[in-house]
């Protein structure tokens, strides 16, 4: 089968072995796959897949089930999307049946490919790790990103006002339309976040560059969850503030979590989040779909840091 690999710093289609479908697994005929920054890092040689995981790019996909292993509740022909540790940018992918969710009614397969990774990440970090409660104030850095777009909508749906930092006025307006209360532009305006502080929860994919400011902005017993290093891996912190505010700082990743953890996370999404798509309270934020032959252009667009929401690659347009 054809699959997308990272070769010498660029995405390249190549032939890959067709994986077998074992007990408790399903095979998906892939319609589309979402792009994520982890894919960019893998292409650049900075983020190897977890041991035993496919080297094919793609942490999420959508499609139609073409084979079902024993012990699965799914049926051939079901329209699904899946959370993956890798392998989604291929004609077929085999995945644990517990890591699969139905495509919500009224949502296309390309839109569905943009859901699993960002909603799993937002739910894990805001509601499981940070234990966000209704009414608590949230700060989302990179608010117009895929995870940020999902997090804004979840905060609104569950009654927690949120603010954002973003890179442009256009992106700030995008976040406000999704439900953010306000925000600032990246750079000198970051100090303007003091006007909205203190925050109970901060979700930060930037890392070192924002660390000192995050600590200043947090409320007593605030929770700070770091999920990325876009702004560097080193920072100097005033640990007196950390102690006096009783701040809880958590480092979080999803890709290298074990299968049982991911199964539990997806089960929570199925119960608490997926019904909100049918109600119209959550909406996929798909900015653009690219054809498979446009893979290099798609990743260049992602690397530009100018994307609102998500990008996907369409691998089989006969399904969409």
Image (cartoon, rainbow, N blue to C red):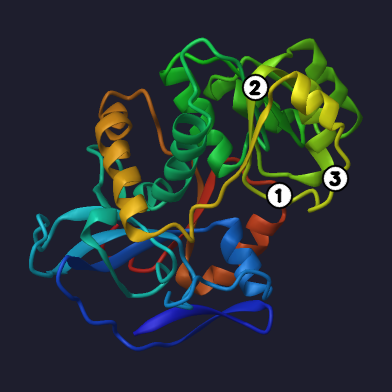
Q: CA distance from mark 1 to mark 2?
A: 28 Å
Among the two numbered marks 3 and 1 on one chain, the one whose residue lies closer to the N terminus? 3
**144 versus 68 height, above or below:** above
Name the residue at 28% across, 82% down.
Answer: 19
Residue nearer the viewer, 102 or 292: 102
Name the residue at 79% across, 48% down.
Answer: 231
What residue is disc 1 on? 305
Q: Is residue 109 left or right of residue 257?
A: left
Numbered mark located on residue 185 in the image: none
Q: From this viewpoint, is residue 66 visible?
A: yes
Q: Is residue 210 left or right of residue 104?
A: right
What residue is disc 2 on? 222
Circle 3 packing at 10 Å, graded few (<14), some (14-19), many (20+), is: few
In which quadrant is the N terminus drawn? bottom left
Which is more foreground, mark 3 or mark 1? 3
Numbered mark located on residue 235 in the image: 3
- Locate residue 230, reporting x and y percent: 74, 51
Among the two numbered marks 1 and 2 on one chain, the one whose residue lies closer to the N terminus? 2
């Amino acid at each position: 089968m054809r699959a997308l690999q990272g070769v010498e710093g660029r995405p390249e289609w190549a032939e890959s072995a067709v994986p077998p479908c074992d007990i408790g697994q399903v095979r998906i005929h892939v319609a589309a796959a979402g792009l994520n920054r982890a894919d960019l890092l893998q292409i650049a040689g900075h983020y190897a897949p977890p041991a035993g995981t496919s080297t094919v790019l793609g942490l999420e996909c959508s499609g139609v089930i073409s084979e079902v292993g024993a012990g699965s509740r799914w049926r051939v022909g079901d329209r699904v999307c899946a959370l993956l540790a890798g392998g989604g940018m291929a004609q077929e992918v085999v995945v644990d049946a517990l890591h699969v969710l139905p495509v919500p009614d009224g949502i296309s397969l390309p839109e569905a490919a943009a859901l699993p990774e960002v909603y799993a990440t937002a739910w894990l970090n805001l509601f499981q790790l940070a234990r966000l409660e209704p009414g608590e104030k949230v700060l989302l850095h990179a608010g117009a990103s895929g995870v940020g777009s999902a997090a804004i909508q979840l905060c609104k749906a569950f009654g927690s006002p949120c603010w954002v930092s973003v890179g442009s006025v256009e992106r700030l307006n995008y976040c406000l339309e999704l439900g953010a209360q306000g925000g600032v532009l990246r750079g000198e305006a970051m100090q303007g976040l003091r006007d909205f502080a203190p925050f109970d929860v901060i979700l930060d994919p930037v890392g070192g560059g924002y660390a000192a400011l995050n600590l200043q902005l947090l409320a007593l017993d605030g929770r700070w969850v770091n999920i990325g290093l876009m702004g560097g891996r080193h920072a100097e912190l005033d640990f007196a503030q950390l102690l006096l505010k009783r701040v809880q700082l958590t480092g979080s990743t999803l890709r290298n979590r074990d299968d049982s953890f991911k199964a539990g996370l997806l089960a929570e999404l199925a119960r608490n989040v997926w019904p909100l798509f049918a109600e119209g309270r959550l909406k996929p934020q798909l900015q653009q779909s690219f054809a498979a032959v446009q893979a290099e252009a798609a990743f260049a667009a992602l690397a530009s840091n100018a994307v609102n929401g998500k990008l996907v690659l369409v691998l089989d347009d006969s399904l969409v």
